[in-house]
Structure formats: C-alpha cells, structure tokens
Image (spheres, helix red, strand yellow):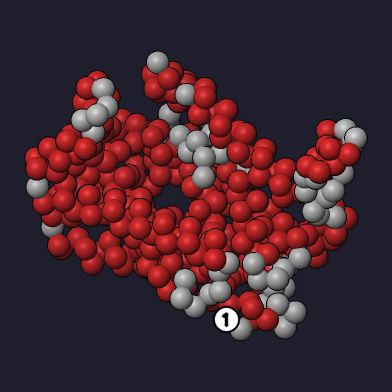
Amino acid sequence: MKLKIAIGLFLSLFFIYLSFWSPNFSALFHGENVFDAFFSETRINLNELGTVLTEAHYLWLLVGVGLLILSLFSRAQRWRILIKPVHKDIRYWPVYSAMNIGYMINNILPLRMGEILRAYFLGKAENISKSSVLATIVVERIVDLLAALALLGVTIFFFPFPDWIRNGLFYIGGGVLLLIFFLVALLINTTLTLRFLRSILKPLPTKIVDRVISIVESFTSGLEVMRSSRHYLSIIGHTFLLQACYILSVFATLLAFDLVTPEYPAIQANPLLASVVLLIIITIGIGVPSAPGAVGTFHGIVAFGVSLFGVPAEKAMGMAIALHLANYIPMTGLGLICFWAQHFKFSEVKDQLSSRGS
C-alpha cells in the first residue's frame, strides 16, 4: 500500500514538474549544476497564467459546475439500477450519499481509494455484501469505459491526433474490448470462463491464482443486472445523459476561457468535437494513479490536451486549474455533507484502510 501511495505521489509531482519546467539534460554535460539543468527553463509564464485566471468568465464555469452536480443525480440512479439485482429494495439516498462520499475520499486520499470505501459505506447503510457492491462499481466503470470507447470511435476519425496518441488510443480501445469480451464470457458461462482463466494463470504461484479467481468470482454478482434486458434501456439512457452533461460542462469551460473564438480555429470550427476530445483526455487524466484529487496528473494531461488545439501553455494550464477546482471543491463539499448526514465517522475510514493495508 505504501509503495502504491509513493508511486501515486511521484506521478503527481512528475506531471506538475513537466507542466511548469522543461528539463535540459544536455546542460548536465556542460558543467551546469543539477538545479539549473532541471529548473532554469520554464514552460509557463506565471504572470501570464495569473492574467488568464483573473480574466476568465467564471459565470460560464459555474454553469459547468451546475451540469456536473446535475449529472450526479443520474449517475446515482444508474448505480442504483445496477445494484437492484443484488438488493431489490435499495434506496436512492444511501446510494447517492455513498457515491458522493467516494468522490470526497478520492479527493483527500490517493489512488482513488474512494471507489473501495464507497462500497463499504453503502454496504453498511443498506446491509449488503461489500463484495457485491464492489462488483457493481466494476460494472459501472465498464459501462463508463464503453461510453468513452463510443466517443473515442467518433473522434479518432475526425480529429487529427498525433500518431503516437492515435496509436495509444487504439491500444487502450483494444484493451477495453478484450475486457468486455471477458466479462460477457463470464456472464454467459461463469464456470467455463473461470476454468479458462485458471489455465492462463497456471504458470503463476497457486496462491496468486486462487486469489485472482476468488476476486473474479466475487465480481460476478455485479453482472447479474446484465442478465435482464429490461434494465438496458435505463442504463443506456442515464449513460447518455451523463456524457451529455460532461461534454456541455467542458464546452462551458471553453467559453469561460474565450477558446471558442477565431483565434483558435480548431476549436471554433467544431466546439462540441473539441469538447468530446478534451473529455476523453480528462477521463484518462482522472484514471492515472496519483495523489489525492488527481493533483498534478489531471493538470498536466488536461493542459496538454488543450494545447493540441493550438492554445498557449498559460491559457491551457489556466483552464486545467479552473476545471480541476470546479470539480474538486463542490465534490468534496457535497461528499462531506453526505458523510455527516449519514452519521459516519472518519475512524471508519482509517479502520478500512488499515484492514486493506494489513
């Protein structure tokens, strides 16, 4: 656990460094000291960055925040639908609260630990098996990946990504498809699929193989909702609404920083396509292991994504900072409200983390 936290913190600091400085390795071989080699060349003018942040139209940013908060109601209902086969009488408020508590914990603890802990808090509130709830979270993330894959399929043929990004996105898409095929196979014939998985993992130590098989078996309960086609339409509808809210939220942020103007023709020509491209990049930025709240990784990846449209580094970083705060502050605040409203205690978080680390 400590190693994972250290890796997350390192990645955050690494992305923060690359966002603001440009390393000059050749200087090390010309007598310059290490500090000058790594910190003498800056990528961003801090005065210009300050100007970008002060001149932004924050009313549009508030519109984006409103759309994100609105999306939470639909996301909670979608998760509730996924849980119903496990617990048919599941109530909306505990689901909504646990989800927001998870986001809050992601913002204050590294490595997206909120995903695990929201399963604990919902399981406690509704007396459901924690592993069953965790399985539905996995399915929820698979649905999100499918949505991202659909968006990627639209954008990759219409937006001129650099070749190395295009190739990377194809690999990511291929990996997602393999995961989906595996889950479908698990749903159709669990026993045969687990036997196949065990045969693939046979070269590994028996203890590790048994642990992997046990984890996969525990997730199969979360797939139960997919056995009933009557839930498909609701899940697709809520997923579509979520993606629409996210795209419009990014679009509002573009307006907040005057990026939908002739100065940036790649954005002005098709601002919705630009918003979808940035949403995909934001999704990747959030998913990278990092420090609490994806600090550093989010900023670096989003700023890089905005720069693909010819936006100066200062404006790109300004948008990344504003977009991060627009997510971080309301999500953390809402999660704390739900946490206290449900009468949970932070000692429970500590106990759960201790049990996972042991």
Tell me if residue 238 comes above or below residue 216 in the rendering.
below
Tell me if residue 340 comes above or below residue 159 in the rendering.
above
Taking the spot 60% from the left edge, 49% from the top edge, the residue there is 298
Q: Would residue 101 be visible to someone looking at this image?
A: no
Taking the spot 60% from the left edge, 38% from the top edge, the residue there is 11
The quadrant holding residue 123 is top left
Q: Which of 307 and 247 is in front in this view?
A: 307
- Tally of numbered tags: 1
> Residue 230 at what x, y percent from top left?
15, 63
Taking the spot 27% from the left edge, 45% from the top edge, the residue there is 136
> Residue 277 at what x, y percent from top left?
53, 67
> Residue 132 at what x, y percent from top left?
23, 37
- SS label for mark 1: loop
Q: Is residue 285 left or right of residue 122?
A: right
Q: Would residue 321 be visible to someone looking at this image?
A: yes
Q: Residue furthest front?
A: 29
Q: Which of 265 and 107 is in front in this view?
A: 265
Q: Is residue 77 left or right of residue 18?
A: left
Kind of residue sitting beneath label 1: Asn
Q: Dot 1: within a 10 Å radius of its alpha carbon, few (fewer than 14), some, or many (20 or more) residues?
A: few
Q: Which residue lies furthest to the top in this view?
A: 358
Tell me if residue 137 comes above or below residue 50 in the rendering.
above
Taking the spot 29% from the left edge, 51% from the top edge, the residue there is 179
Residue bearing the label numbered 1: 270
> Residue 314 at what x, y percent from top left?
78, 60
In the picture, the quarter occupied by the C terminus is top left
Q: Nearer the viewer, residue 83 or 13?
A: 13
The quadrant holding residue 219 is top left
Q: Is residue 34 left or right of residue 67?
A: right
